[in-house]
Amino acid sequence: MKNENKVSTYENPFLPEPARIVRTYHLTEDVKFFQVRIADMEKALSFKYKIGQFAMISVLGAGEAPFSISSTPSRPGLLEFCIRKTGIVTEAIFRLKENDMIGIRGPYGNGFPVEQMRGNDILITMGGLGAAPLRSVLLYCLDNRDQFGRVILLHGAKKPSEMLLREEFLSLKQRQDLECHLSVDKDDTGNWTENTGVVTTLFPKIENLVPSSTYALVCGPPVMYKFVLKELLKLNIPKDQILMTLERRMKCGVGKCGHCAIDYIYTCLDGPVFTYWDVIHMRELI
Amino acid sequence: MNNGKLKIGIFELTGCAGDALLILDCEKELLDIFKAVDIQVFLMASSEVTDEKLDIALVEGSVSTEKEIEELKDIRERAEVVVAIGICATVGGIQARFTDPKEWENKYKEVYGDIEMTHTKAVPSKPIDAYITVDTYLPGCPIGKDQFLNLFTRVVKGNLPERYPRPVCVTCKYNENDCLLNKGIACLGPLTEDGCGSICPNHNVPCFGCWGPVEGANLTSEYHLLQEKGFDIEAIKKQMANYSGTKLVEFFKQLKKESK
Amino acid sequence: MKIVKLKKENLFPFLEEISKEADLWAPTKVESDRHKFQAIDDLDQIDIEYTRTILPPRKIILPPTINMFQASDKEYKEDFSHVSKKIIFGIHPCDLHGLLIMDNFFTHEFYDPYYMESRKNTLLLGHSCWPDENCLCKSTRTHIIKEGYDLFFSKIDDTYIVWIGSSKGDDLIRAKEDLFEEDISDKDIKKYTEWGDERDKAFQTEINFDSLRDLMELKYDDPLWKKVGNACLACGSCTNVCPTCNCYNIQDRPVLGENYSEIKRCWDACTLENYSEVAGGENFREKRSDRLKLWYTHKFQVYITEYGKPGCVGCGRCISTCPVDINVKTVGKSLDGEKVDSFWNRLDKEVTK
């Protein structure tokens, strides 16, 4: 016997909201910036998220994938994403133009522990696409500048043309309340005025850090973690104050599809933000 | 002709043309297919051929002559996306089972004798990715209707299907068959890509691998399992070789080493 | 709890009556030796003397493929066409426990309407069973059931003792009240407890599940994992037949000639090669041993920590399914230090000789 009517009064967590691409442009050759607004204005404003959370974006005919939110909840209404072209869904996203529609649902994941971070110094180390989730943190800290101690940014890229949000970060250098250090492995332009060398060469520039009151946030390519973590441990930052955000295959975002399972946790519910202690403790994390 | 529709070519190299036939057999959907795209080349349906740029080329059959190598390279140059359809194109098919050059030459002589080919030269059969980059694969012998329509509806919207190769056992379990291996029957289900709907095991006939080897197949384990169950190892190798084309050559070499 | 009695010959009239209101599903015999749950047109199809079906009854609640919604540029239309009123008759205690775990899982943190709407429209009529050599439910303490069913039929000779587990179950009885008897005699009770004792003795396999939680942790790098990894055919069967596996994949399938896609939800299996592959090709669990470790972590460890009982309900399906003997019995016993005779052990000797 067919039951024609949906009986539920529950919200369906799998249904996306139609959203419009407001602005999009290339950040690097294979990374694009997307500014998105949920079509329903009320829902756009009530989309409450925390720094470090992610959303599921779907493109009609291509599929759905998880993406870190790069904007800050301190500036509601618009959502921003830095997306790298890596597969079928992202290729479809890359073909979209301003005013095109996508589906969006979320926010998902634990996000960074803002409450705990308040009142402490924040040391952000990013490389490559790691700028996508950590930009959200940086902007949030700057928007709520009085709530945090020192804010330090270390950002590394292979070469200037591959540095995500280069102009945005360069302009931040003028701020007195932010210690902003940028570096490229190799300068192929000849007019790079910042540091040259891998991102860990920026660590000596940090002076008088008080490790017990510092939260270190790291995101970048796998190879970066190894070296950056070494530096952070050298600085004596407690293992549970080193925070990183990780990538996994996800199909649902709500702890049902199983793809992001690690040990007894689901990255989409209990992550994507983990402490360094979690990483040691749960062997499969990185 | 430019009507904003995607330009598609369906090409047949060496094979039985069964895949092209299957496309024509999508009777219910055929009108919609022709409406949705602009089919430029499809010898099975029309002798009209153009040499315009294509958005998508579906290539069936293995590469068996020098002429076909040229033809294939030309297809790659003309087409934005190349899809290998059917196991002849994806793994080389039955005609690629003689992978050893010496063996191939002997077989060739046996069949053709000393007849000289004038218009082209025969070469050992290979899957199309031996010569060109392939964007996605649609295995099958012939390809499955549902999988073809999935591929087709996706590419028409500009997206490749998300390829998720899995062994025949997955569908076989959905169909609630008892595992034939457990019944002591030499079934190649775990080594073979799914898509057929486990049609043979559904009728208690073991899978003989016609969809080609699945990515990540554990050949060593299955080989030893069948050996333990008392099957003739040469017969098993033959069975495995039937539809695996050039893709299991390394495995067979390794077996040879082991048995020495 | 309310308990009534039903004579064997009254079972079919009762099922006849209640199947007027809903689709009746029950175990049926396929060929000579296998059973599966099927929608019943003719009550004679039912074969209640079964040990286990190939797939667990979760397939009735959430079939291998469903449509979740229709997606277009402007809107998303929910599709709940897999939901209908159903009654499943003949579920064994282990499978009822399996569904209880699924209920728990699909309402944990986020409510999954695709499972739950279907589940809420399904009545579960359990049935007593007799173990074979692969039944492990006594070790997992799922051989008895106190909740989760609407009715439970314990067969004692030519009579059923019918336990009423829910208000809806009670309604079913009321629909054909005259078929049932109220008073359970002392003789019935004696027969029932004797039957229970006999059944307890009939279990042939025992596994110490309590120690497995810690053993999974302590033996994380045990050579066992390499051995099972070498033998695993990555066919996904253990996962597909498991009553507590829930993984799925989502596909966007455009509809030919239309401007919308059907968003499909299909079963997935963590033991398959590409399960943990992300866009760009990186596979977080390329090794079969890593995938098996995840599966066993979920069966032996996670649920004990989360819900106080193992994720395995002891149904024995993985034991009767896996062609290379990787199952809760051999892996569990091995972790516990026992030497087991299995293909994966023999293969290890074969390839390392």
Image (cartoon, helix red, strand yellow):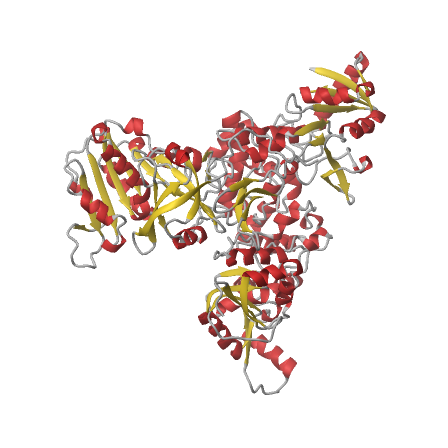
Towards the viewer: B131 or C319: B131
Q: Is residue C258 above or below residue B11?
A: above
Q: For the point 82% across and 19% down, which residue is it?
A: C178
Q: For the point 22% across and 52% down, which residue is it?
A: A184
Residue C168 at x, y percent in the picture: 68, 22
Residue B249: name its quadrant. bottom right
Q: Is residue A30 above or below residue C110?
A: below
Q: Quadrant of the C terminus of chain B?
A: bottom right
Towards the viewer: B184 or C17: C17
Q: Is residue A125 left or right of residue A271?
A: left
Residue C164 at x, y percent in the picture: 71, 19
Question: From this viewpoint, which residue is outermost toward the right?
Answer: C9
Q: Is residue A163 above or below residue C192?
A: below
Towards the viewer: B168 or C74: C74
Q: For the point 51% across and 41% down, which residue is it?
A: C76
Residue B178 at x, y percent in the picture: 70, 46
Towards the viewer: A13 or A186: A13
Q: Is residue C53 left or right of residue C107?
A: right
Residue A68 visible? The answer is yes
Residue A247 visible? The answer is no
Image mark count: 0
Residue C210 at x, y percent in the picture: 55, 27
Q: Is residue C22 left or right of residue C75?
A: right
